[in-house]
Image (spheres, rainbow, N blue to C red):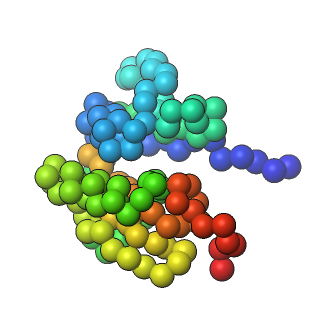
Amino acid sequence: MRPTLTHLALHVPDLDACVAFYTEFCGMQVIHQRAGKGARIVWMAEPGKEHEFIFVIMPGGQDRCLAEDDYSHFGFAVASREQVDEVAAKAQLDGCLVWSPRDEPYPVGYYCGLRDPAGNYVEFSYGQPLGPGSQAMPIP
């Protein structure tokens, strides 16, 4: 047996705020909505990846209250260092930047971190061996 990771399910305190965040910052889109257990449940995915990996977002969660030095996060790759800077600048204006852009040795690369409305941290990176900008070398 070889399982495949297909989704991540999150209970969040403000469903609409989280849907807006993942739409605006991550480019995800709502691909399905349904009523479930008395509340709306939303499925979101990156365009073209609807059958590969989704976020299932449900109301009823509590704020995560992560410390700034807690590096638990969801990771999104972007196509350039400039895109990391653009995300960080927008997040700074919106008051959700937690890690200013920084450079780390391979395989970490250049990244910044945001706080979503539920308190989860979301990383935007360039130069990791995953996604856009990935290098064609093995992970050490």
Residue at the image point whose x is 36% and y is 71% from the top: 70
Image coordinates of residue 91 in percent, x first then y, are 22, 53
Q: Is residue 112 left or right of residue 51?
A: left
**30 w.r.t. 108: above or below:** above
Image coordinates of residue 41 in percent, x first then y, are 43, 26
Residue at the image point whose x is 76% and y is 48% from the top: 3
Answer with the quarter of the image where residue 10 lies: top left
| 33, 30: nearer the viewer | 30
Answer with the quarter of the image where residue 39 lies: top left
Q: Is residue 76 visible?
A: yes
Q: Is residue 56 left or right of residue 140?
A: left
Answer with the quarter of the image where residue 7 lies: top right
Q: Is residue 61 visible?
A: no
Looking at the image, the residue that sits furthest to the right is 1
**30 w.r.t. 68: above or below:** above
Q: Can you say which quadrant of the picture contains the C terminus?
A: bottom right
